[in-house]
Structures are given as structure tokens and as C-alpha cells.
Amino acid sequence: MEIAQKKFLTKTELADLLKVSWVTLDKRRKDGILPFHKIGSRVIYIESDVEIFLKNTEASITVGVLK
């Protein structure tokens, strides 16, 4: 049986990747736009979830919906 390894992204890593601020990430997360998970009080993002999100919203991001 093969167990898939998932890569987790921190808020800082995702903000750098998307070129947005932490505040923008928090707003989009609270609005239900960005997929996330919580471990205790810590918010993490799964890289594969973010990739799917980006593919599904690629056109929107290019016109600045995330910002």
C-alpha cells in the first residue's frame, strides 16, 4: 500500500507564492475562497489543494480577484 506524501505550506510560503499579503490570505480564507486546514490553532495549506484552487481560478487571479 502506498501512502501519498502531502506537502504543507505555511502562511508565509503561500503569501510569497501568490504574491499577496498575510492579510489578503486571511480575508480569502475567512471568505471561504482558499482551501485550508487547522492543526490546533495553526492554519496550514496543502500544496495539492492550492494547485487545484489555482487551476480552477486561474483566469480570476490574472485579473486580480485575489488582491
Image (cartoon, rainbow, N blue to C red):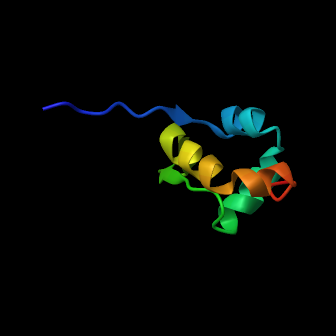
Q: At 55% from the left edge and 53% from the top edge, which residue is drawn? A: 36
Apparent side of residue 23 relative to residue 2 in the rendered image (left or right):
right
The answer to whether residue 44 is visible is no
Apparent side of residue 46 relative to residue 26 in the rendered image (left or right):
left
Q: At 50% from the left edge and 52% from the top edge, which residue is drawn? A: 38
Residue 37 percent location from the top left of the image: 50, 52
Foreground residue, 15 or 58? Answer: 58
Q: At 63% from the left edge and 67% from the top edge, which residue is drawn? A: 32
Residue 12 percent location from the top left of the image: 71, 35
Apparent side of residue 10 relative to residue 4 in the rendered image (left or right):
right
Apparent side of residue 48 relative to residue 65 in the rendered image (left or right):
left
Q: Residue furthest front?
A: 59
Give the tally of numbered discs. Answer: 0
Picture layout, residue 26 above or below residue 18: below
Q: Residue furthest left?
A: 1
Q: At 35% from the left edge and 30% from the top edge, which residue is drawn? A: 5
Picture layout, residue 6 above or below residue 21: above
Residue 44 percent location from the top left of the image: 55, 44
Residue 18 quadrant? top right
Residue 23 percent location from the top left of the image: 82, 52
Foreground residue, 13 or 2? Answer: 2
The quarter of the image holding the N terminus is top left
The answer to whether residue 1 is visible is yes
Picture layout, residue 31 above or below residue 56: below
Foreground residue, 52 or 28? Answer: 52
